[in-house]
Amino acid sequence: MFDSDALNEVEVGIAIWDAVDKLSWANTAYRDFYGLPEHLMEEGAPILEHLRHFASIGLYGDRSPEEQVKLEHARFLNRADKMLLDYRLPDGRVMEMRHAPLAKGGKVILHTDVSGFRAYERTLAENDPITGLPSAEAGERMAQSLIDGSEGRGSEGLGLRLRILRLGQYESAFGIGFTNRLIKRFVKKIEALLDKDAVFFRAGGSEFGIFSLTRDAHNLGVSLSKAILEALKLPIILKQGGSPHSITLSVSLGMSRYPKDGTTLGDLWRKNRQIMLEAISEGENQARFYTGKLDAKFARRAKENLQLAEDMRRALRQGEFFLKYQPQVQASNHRLLGCEALMRWEHPDLGDVSPDRFIPIAEEVGLIGELGKKALVDACTQAMAWRDSGLPNMVLCVNVSRLQAQDPAFSKTVEDALQISGLPAANLELELTESVLAENLITVSKNLEQIRALGIRLAIDDFGTGYSSLAQLADLPFDRLKIDKRFVEQIGSGQDALVRAVILIAQSLDMEVVAEGVETEADVSALVAMGCDQMQGYYFSKPLPADQFLNFCQERF
Ligand code: C2E
Ligand code: MG
Ligand code: MG
């Protein structure tokens, strides 16, 4: 049938499975990768035996082997889709498995050792390709080794966080190429002011970090922040389309001192960031040191957040979280397209707590994984129940937090939710905000690809509010773009051009567009005139509890 000698030469493991899940043939690379015993290499060996062998050599990590074998088996039985999955062996090797269903039944799985390639991807992730600066992770590591190397010599350290303000506007006005050149020139200016041993990194989007060892961190902070603000007063001249533009960048700086303000880098960066955000709220080109005494408002808020974080753990156990569903409609014929699942927290003392409040806290205290998983499983289960009770086919949208999107296990969580609920992948859409793209882009885009490969749809939420580059968006596999309600609000106040531009951008990227926060008849007609026909907002319906959503649908559609 085929030349098995040649296939035994290749460095890709090949296993061919027949329609009843028994081994037809496998090559030697496959055997050698996993140290399979000879009896498992014989024709007719059952897949389950192979999966158990994989579990025994630690291919599935330290998760419960039985459960994992079950999950992997279900994955294997999926004949509808091609799949691409990475597994890490305890010896550090990363194996990629590529499932390809065969037309006549059965399946081929190709196994590739991608350890080298993944390591290369990691180096790419260590450097920002635009500026050549270290990434946030790499920068943090470098700063840590400076600290480690200075131990016992009584040095202090200055941590400085810096954000370029309104960078997104330059991109909207002049494009991504221009903005990248602007950032490069900015980086050159800053580099010229730094000691050669200082660590300077790009923390993501428009934020940068500096760490420097010194004898007197306070002194260095005063002089460096002054020098930075002074240097930025001189405009950067850049040409675009033949004509020169003069740009004066505004920034905001937050500083903290090692070891006075924090003895770990994580702690220092957090304080830097906090103080930087405070500086931003005070105006442009402000530099501030962390003082230890946050103003009263900050302190009260921080205390409340701690309490909420505590309450949240209990609330998750006691079922205080539930979902509401907001319809999305086609404006031209009022057809129901789908709905967005929105998390609600009914706090026993405080009443409704807004997701804008509890999601960031959940992210900060590490509960977002659990909460996000709950949203996925509950929403998919609900959507499946609606399908079973005869509601028309529709898309269910679930929001995904930045941290979920960065979790290497995320696509598995999503896959599990589909399996548990039975909802077809094509009925699920995941919403991610632009800020998702600012950090760990490699992990994020890999997750997005895996999710897309499962047949799930992807949408960009709150488009227009974050800083993402259009070039990036064009490269990522999004199906739909949601225009933020802040844009929709501007309709009728003479700002229609902005909304129109956003719709055109989406269309040029070949995405569907849905407008959020549609509240009035006038919004609807203006949006339709601009070519946006998909809408969500109070005009059609507020987010509804599951039973009311069902009534709404039965009455209206
Ligand atoms: P979002 O995903 O952009 O959701 C749309 C928000 O706009 C919702 O706020 C919705 O209630 C509100 N909205 C809808 N129509 C109108 C309208 O006509 N006028 C006005 N003024 N507002 C409207 P909500 O439910 O408070 O959620 C806020 C944000 O919290 C969401 O914004 C989303 O980013 C986040 N969120 C909610 N549930 C989850 C979740 O399960 N996971 C994650 N990660 N985030 C969630
Ligand atoms: Mg959303
Ligand atoms: Mg939104």
Image (spheres, grey):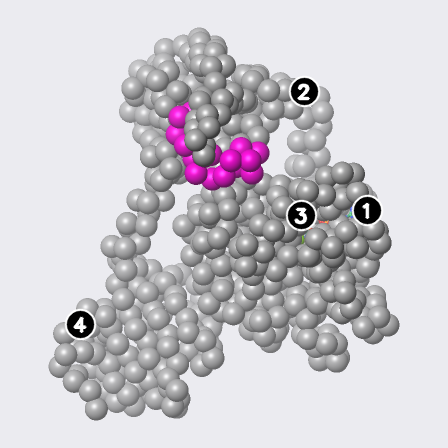
In front here: 263 or 16?
Answer: 16
Which of the image's four quarters has the C terminus?
A: bottom right
Magenta stretch: give its range: 169-186
Between the residue at mark 1 and the residue at mark 2, the CA separation in whole angstroms equals 27 Å
Q: Residue at x 58, y 50 (%)?
A: 505
Between the residue at mark 2 and the residue at mark 4, the CA separation in whole angstroms equals 65 Å
Between the residue at mark 3 and the residue at mark 4, the CA separation in whole angstroms equals 54 Å
Mark 2 packing: few (<14 Cα in 10 Å), some, or many (20+)?
few
Asked whether, in this view, residue 325 is left or right of residue 452, the answer is: right
Give whichever of discs 3 and 2 has the lower sequence position: 2
Ligand 1 has an atom within 8 Å of the beta carbon of the residue at disc 1: no
Could one spot residue 225 in this view of the protein?
Answer: no
Give whichever of discs 1 and 3 has the lower sequence position: 1
Q: Which residue is mark 2?
A: 295
Confirm whether the magenta stretch covers residue 181: yes
Q: In the image, which disc is placed on residue 10?
A: 4
Q: In the image, which disc is placed on residue 341?
A: none
Give whichever of discs 3 and 4 has the lower sequence position: 4
Q: Which residue is mark 1?
A: 351
Q: Secondary structure at mark 3?
A: helix
Inspect the image, locate mark 2, and give the three-letter code of the amino acid beneath it: Asp
Viewer-side label of 3, 4: 3
Q: Which residue is mark 3?
A: 500
Q: Secondary structure at mark 4?
A: loop
Q: Secondary structure at mark 2?
A: loop
Give whichever of discs 1 and 2 has the lower sequence position: 2
Q: Tell me if residue 393 comes above or below residue 136 in the rendering.
A: below
Ligand 1 has an atom within 8 Å of the beta carbon of the residue at disc 2: no
Confirm whether the magenta stretch covers residue 395: no
